[in-house]
Amino acid sequence: MPRNVPSFTELLDGAQHSAVHLEMRDAYGVAGEADNFGHWQRTGERDNDPESPHWGPWTSLIRRTVARGVVVRRARIVSEPVSDYIRYEHAGTQVNIEAGEQVRWLPRRQASDIALPGNDFWLLDERLIRWNHFTGDGASGGGEISEDPAAAKLCAEAFEAVWARATPHQDYKIS
């Protein structure tokens, strides 16, 4: 049975050196983003105000985490041509970067020979994993915490392999 899953605030506040996040889905159906995604689909406009109600809690958390010396990196493996959801994410990623995250993108075709875990994850200090589970339609299926050393090693190696091949956000062009 999975242990209680700490909030992202608790997890990142507890990180000492590193926090890496690997995203591997082409679409997410997270309820908290539905209105913003729908607005973007209708208008092409994206909330990119780091202090907005949508972004403010996240940017505050990332800024405080990075200020303590924790390196926060996010890598996204994406199919090309990209989905509308990935276009939406790309349009808002500058806010992540301004908050202190480093973000890279890897076309899925370039990840074929990388051993990847079956789920998106956060890996903190190369030892604590927060697995992100999703339903078939992309809704959150809940998180799970693991400190299994073999799984942490797999996540660390997978993330570093993706990171080494991936394109920094400012250079990744959506076609």
Image (cartoon, helix red, strand yellow):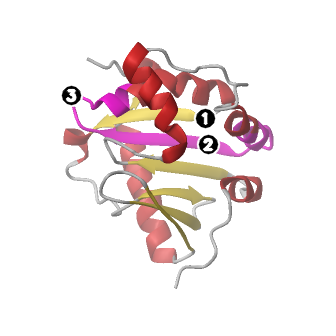
Q: Marks 3 and 1, Cα distance to the nearest angstrom?
A: 25 Å
- For label 2, the residue is 72
Taking depth in this image into account, of 163 and 9 the one nearest to the observer is: 9
Q: Amino acid at mark 3?
A: Pro
Residue 102, picture quadrant: top right
Report the number of discs.
Answer: 3
Residue 41, picture quadrant: top left
Q: Are marks 1 and 2 in contact (CB under 8 Å)?
A: yes
Q: Are marks 3 and 1 in contact (CB under 8 Å)?
A: no
Single out the residue that lies furthest toward the bottom: 1
Q: Marks 3 and 2, Cα distance to the nearest angstrom?
A: 27 Å
Q: Are marks 3 and 2 in contact (CB under 8 Å)?
A: no
Question: What residue is at 51 percent from the left and 29 percent from the top?
Answer: 36
Q: Secondary structure at mark 2?
A: strand
Q: Mark 3 or mark 2, which has the lower sequence index? A: 2
Question: What residue is at 46 percent from the left and 67 percent from the top?
Answer: 153
- Left or right? Give the position of 173 relative to 121: left
- Location of the C terminus by quadrant is top left
Q: Position of residue 21 (x, y in %)?
A: 51, 49
Taking depth in this image into account, of 33 and 2 the one nearest to the observer is: 33
Q: Tell me if residue 40 comes above or below residue 15 in the rendering.
A: above
Residues drawn in magenta? 61-87
Q: Mark 3 or mark 1, which has the lower sequence index? A: 3
Judge the density around disc 3: few (<14), some (14-19), many (≥20) Cα neighbours within 10 Å.
few
Q: Position of residue 106 (x, y in %)?
A: 33, 36
- For label 1, the residue is 101
- For label 3, the residue is 81
Q: Amino acid at mark 1?
A: Glu
Q: Tell me if residue 6 comes above or below residue 105 in the rendering.
A: below
Q: Amino acid at mark 2?
A: Val
Question: What residue is at 40 percent from the left and 45 percent from the top?
Answer: 29
Question: What residue is at 42 percent from the left and 14 percent from the top?
Answer: 43
